Image (cartoon, helix red, strand yellow):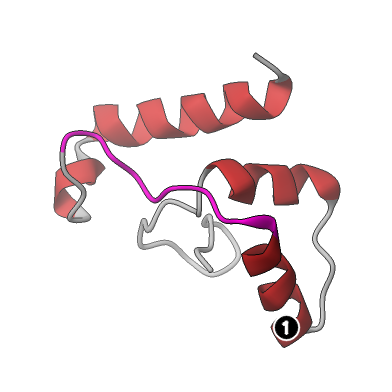
Amino acid sequence: MNEMEQIVEAVKAAICESGLVKSLGYHDGLLPPGLAEETIAQHERRLGITLPDDLRSFYRRLNGTGCPTDEDQGWVRF
């Protein structure tokens, strides 16, 4: 397992352990799936940005968490 996969698994585990999974409407520990590369590219074009490779890798594995957080502190979903 590479470093990004470890990070994604740690995020998923923390959300599941915190009880946020059910409060966010996810069932059986299922969190938002990753995004296709083209979907990420579409959002980059829409926002006029280019994500760093490591963040692109994260979004390919997990589309944020859906957790309600402050804009500058949360994992944003596309």
Magenta stretch, main secondary structure, is loop
Tell me which residue sits at (42%, 51%) in the image: 65
Tell me which residue sits at (17%, 55%) in the image: 25
On screen, residue 76 above or below 42: above
Q: Position of residue 46 (x, y in %)?
A: 71, 86
On screen, residue 6 above or below 36: above
Lateral position of residue 15 relative to residue 76, left or right:
left
Tell me which residue sits at (68%, 29%) in the image: 4
Q: Position of residue 10 (x, y in %)?
A: 49, 25
Q: Tell me which amino acid carries mark 1.
A: Leu
**Residue 30 lies within the magenta run:** yes
Q: Where is residue 43 in the image (x, y as percent from the top left)?
A: 67, 75
Query: Looking at the rendering, which quadrant does residue 47 occupy?
Result: bottom right
- Asked whether 40 or 65 is in front, the reply is 40
| Magenta-drawn segment | 28-37
Query: Looking at the rendering, which quadrant does residue 13 occupy?
Result: top left
Q: How many labels does the image show?
A: 1
- Asked whether 73 or 7 is in front, the reply is 7
Q: Residues within 10 Å of mark 1 (few under 14, many from 20)?
A: few
On screen, residue 68 above or below 49: above
Label 1: element kind: helix
Q: Label 1: which residue? A: 47
**Residue 46 lies within the magenta run:** no
Q: Where the N terminus falls, by quadrant?
A: top right
Query: Looking at the rendering, which quadrant does residue 28 occupy?
Result: top left
Lateral position of residue 37 relative to residue 32, left or right:
right
On screen, residue 28 above or below 1: below
